[in-house]
Amino acid sequence: MRIKSEDGTKEMRAVWFEDGIVKLIDQRQLPANFEIFEAKTTEEVAYAIKEMVVRGAPAIGITAAYGMAQASLQGRNVDEAFEILRNTRPTAHDLFYALRSMMDAINSGEDPVKKAEEYANDIIGRCEKIGEYGEKLIKDGYRILTHCNAGALAVGDWGTATAPIRKAHRNGKKIFVWVDETRPRLQGARLTAWEMVQEGIEHAIIADNAAGYFMRKGEIDMVIVGADRITSNGDVANKIGTYEKAVVAKENGIPFYVAAPISTFDFSLENGDQIPIEERREEEVLFCRECRIAPQESHARNPAFDVTPAKYITGIITEKGVFKPEEIWKLKS
Ligand SMILES: CSC[C@H]1O[C@H](OP(=O)(O)O)[C@H](O)[C@@H]1O
């Protein structure tokens, strides 16, 4: 596993299920503190998702799967648990994919704990395959920009965007990673950078506004980001700021890749304008950690995601290979 404990002695996943408790690395505390959050009820699992104790589409799905298993074990009404978990965050398709998978399994009499573990292992295995396909796109000496955290913390292990990066590094390729800080929750500066340090990958954190500067200077060879939801036409919802990185990458002739497993694809939607975009509380923008950075009288808007139209995307890296946006219909089962 790619995540190490604080003292480096243990390898672990971002989320796991132990003694009936959903246990999560509290990503709100990283990198300063390495703390484990224990969710003992459906409500506590929902809190962990909504308050971003755990975040990242696949990791949210795995957490919800464990939440359903826990509810079933506790004899809770699983329909009620489904609704509580479904109403946490609206954009990441993995949440709904996982809940449907678990509900189908429970209704067909499968062991919910076994099913949740199978779900987690399946998704993580798919992301390792993303790493294998994506690694082939990375040449020795490449300088790669990534946005937000689509790492092992966002999946459970390996990551989506960081899976090819990890594989390239482990295969001995010399790479450098530009890490967008990713305001307002700083998933890049806090989480991706922490993962790069753990992996020993050379990197630099940059302000969100600096990516275009480095693109135009010719210091970025490719962009790889994650995704929260991908629609039938190849439009991609991902962390706010992804769209503008994609537009500027195209302007500078830089290949722009999205990495995601099948659980992130929503073939029920024709295009990205149909994706529900989460808007979070304004305080996330008005404050940086506990420090208010804006006048008391000022308000803020805080969309957590944006949509990148397919025309700005060079390819989508999946567990079944790399596809042009117009080819993803081939993935539809
Ligand atoms: C591997 S999916 C990661 C995806 O999720 C992040 O959003 P959030 O941190 O709000 O859950 C971001 O969009 C990442 O690309």
Image (tube, helix red, strand yellow):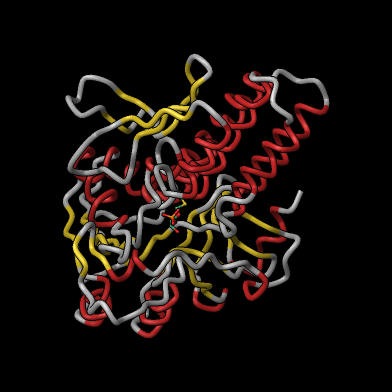
Q: Where, by quadrant of the figure, is residue 76 drawn?
A: top right
* Side of 192 where 39 appears, left or right: right
| Residue 211 place in picture, x, y as percent | 26, 74
User: Which one is nearer the viewer's eye here, 143 or 38?
Assistant: 38
Look at the picture and state if 233 lies above or below 16.
Answer: below
Please state the quadrant of the image where ligand 1 appears. Answer: bottom left
| Residue 248 place in picture, x, y as percent | 36, 81
* Side of 103 where 24 appears, left or right: left
Q: Residue at x 28, y 59 (%)?
A: 186
| Residue 113 place in picture, x, y as percent | 62, 20
Q: Residue at x 60, y 33 (%)?
A: 65
Q: Residue at x 46, y 41 (%)?
A: 48
* Side of 295 where 23 appears, left or right: right
Look at the picture and state if 266 lies above or below 279.
Answer: above
Q: Quadrant of the N terminus?
A: top left
User: Which one is nearer the viewer's eye here, 310 or 55?
Assistant: 55
Which residue of the protein is positioned furthest toward the bottom in this rendering?
Answer: 251
| Residue 54 place in picture, x, y as percent | 42, 43
Look at the picture and state if 248 lies above or below 189.
Answer: below
How many marks the image carries: the answer is 0
